[in-house]
Amino acid sequence: MRTAIGAAIIRNGAILLVKKRNTWILPGGKPEKEESDIDCLIREITKEEIPGTKLTNSRFYREFKGKTPHRGDILSAKVYLVKIQGKIKPDAEITDVKWIKNPQNYNLSEITEKIIKDLQKKGYL
């Protein structure tokens, strides 16, 4: 089973989601060999997906499992609650990035939908 590290970045009741192909997901990605979860988030988000940003206050939230939208395999996602600073502008394979208050109106991956429902249930959104 593949593992990904995701950042739940929440501000003023909105969650920051990135669009990859036609699907909205949490920012983050797959760790490289011997890379810590936080180092993975820093590399994926601040250097590749949303360059020029800085992550702060990272803390582990929960782990989720779900089907990926592109391969259809099962993915384990470790989710961290994270704060972000800087200009939010997509790069690399990310075609859009938005602060979203109504995620149910977007084409979310299965695992992203699970994560958002859990964050709503716990009062984060």
Image (tube, rainbow, N blue to C red):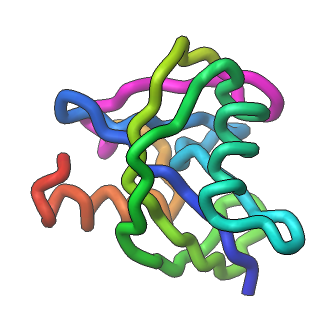
* Of residues 124 and 46, the one drawn nearer to the viewer in this rendering: 46
Q: Is residue 95 magenta?
A: yes
- Establish if 117 lies above or below 56: below
Residue 7 location (% of width, % of height): 49, 51
The residue stretch that appears in magenta: 90-104
- Establish if 39 lies above or below 103: below
Name the side, left or right, on which 14 lies relative to 64.
left
Name the side, left or right, on which 20 lies relative to 114.
right
Q: Please give the count of numbered marks on the rendered protein.
A: 0
Name the side, left or right, on which 114 lies relative to 37.
left
* Of residues 82 and 111, the one drawn nearer to the viewer in this rendering: 82
Residue 35 seen by the camera: yes
Res. 66 image quadrant: bottom right
- For image coordinates 45% across by 31% down, the residue present is 84
Quadrant in which the N terminus is drawn: bottom right
Residue 42 location (% of width, % of height): 66, 44
- For image coordinates 39% across by 38% down, the residue present is 83
* Of residues 85 and 117, the one drawn nearer to the viewer in this rendering: 85
* Of residues 39 and 73, the one drawn nearer to the viewer in this rendering: 39
Res. 53 image quadrant: top right
Residue 10 location (% of width, % of height): 31, 39
Residue 114 seen by the camera: no
